[in-house]
Amino acid sequence: MDHSTDASSNAIAAATAAFGLFGLIVGFAFLILMVIVYYRIVAKAGWNGWLSLLLFVPIVNIVMILIFAFSTWPIERRLAYLEHGVPGMAPGMPPPPMPPSIV
């Protein structure tokens, strides 16, 4: 039995395991970053930020992206209400409470 072959095999196995562990850590960090980014985007659009977790479910993620792309966002409804739904509001006046159907 050749001891140099065993040592080189062990070194290759250790290097492969180290690269695998590094890749796993980087992948997990990227996954956490994507959850934070999706959460922020969905929350800024006016929906509950936890809906962003649906983007990791196959098929549902495609449906959610289509809903986000083609529906009227809650923030757009609020803006339209404030721009057009409050006649005679003086500048600097606080807006009236939002109707429950808009929130």
Image (cartoon, rainbow, N blue to C red):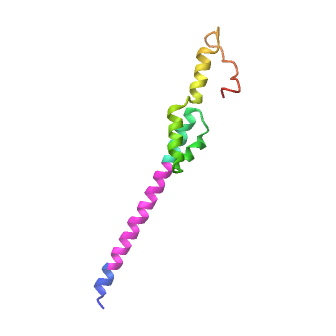
Above or below: residue 86 compared with residue 44:
above
Q: Which of 74 and 67 is in front in this view?
A: 67
Place of residue 14 in the rendered image (x, y in percent of width and height, measured from the top left) = 38, 73
Q: Nearer the viewer, residue 98 or 16?
A: 98
Q: How would you classify the magenta stretch by its main secondary structure?
A: helix
Place of residue 30 in the rendered image (x, y in percent of width and height, measured from the top left) = 46, 51
Q: Where is residue 80, by image quadrant?
A: top right
Q: Which of 32 and 77 is in front in this view?
A: 77
Above or below: residue 19 compared with residue 2:
above
Q: What stretch is highlighted in magenta?
A: 9-33
- Residue at 54% from the left image edge and 46% from the top image edge: 60
Seen as rendered, the residue at the extreme bottom is 1
Give yes or no for residue 4 being in the magenta stretch: no
Place of residue 92 in the rendered image (x, y in percent of width and height, measured from the top left) = 62, 13
- Residue at 70% from the left image edge and 23% from the top image edge: 99
Quadrant showing the C terminus: top right
Give yes or no for residue 10 being in the magenta stretch: yes
Above or below: residue 101 compared with residue 5:
above
Quadrant showing the N terminus: bottom left
- Residue at 61% from the left image edge and 38% from the top image edge: 48
- Residue at 37% from the left image edge and 69% from the top image edge: 16
- Would residue 23 be found to the left or right of residue 99 on screen? left
